[in-house]
Amino acid sequence: MLPQTVMRMLEARFHPRRKAVGEFIVVGHVVWGGESTRPVVQAAAGLPRGKGATLLSKVQYLVSISACESFERLRALRSQFWSFVEV
């Protein structure tokens, strides 16, 4: 029998006018699973070029500084402009 792989995913959202306004842009997804213990950042479909690349690089930065507990740390991130929601 093959071991089951648990896959976890967070949706990275950017709130251009702060979270309180309610508008957000889905920048990408942060995925944990498979053989690697490190998460993979995937760009969202339809992410605009230019500014979208800048936003995606910010997500990659936030993932890199959250270290080994990145899933929990990203979900608990206190930011007016970023949120990470489990999907």
Image (tube, rainbow, N blue to C red):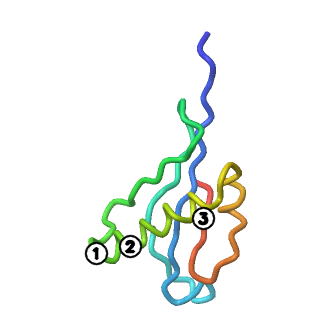
Tell me how far mark 2 sits from mark 3, CA to CA. Answer: 17 Å
Task: State the residue at coordinates (57%, 87%).
Answer: 18
Relative placement, left or right, of 43 versus 22 is left
Tell me how far mark 2 sits from mark 1, CA to CA. Answer: 7 Å
- The residue that label 3 is drawn on is 84
Other-residue count near label 2 (Cα within 10 Å), few / some / many at <14 / 14–19 / ≥20: few
- Disc 2 marks a residue whose amino acid type is Thr
Quadrant housing the C terminus: bottom right
Report the number of discs.
Answer: 3
The mark closer to the camera, 2 or 3, is 2
Residue 81 placement (x, y as % from top left): 57, 81
Residue situated in front as seen by the camera: 69 or 75: 69
Residue 52 placement (x, y as % from top left): 35, 72
Residue situated in front as seen by the camera: 1 or 36: 36
Q: Which mark is residue 50?
A: 1
- The residue that label 2 is drawn on is 54
Quadrant housing the N terminus: top right
Other-residue count near label 1 (Cα within 10 Å), few / some / many at <14 / 14–19 / ≥20: few
Residue 49 placement (x, y as % from top left): 27, 71
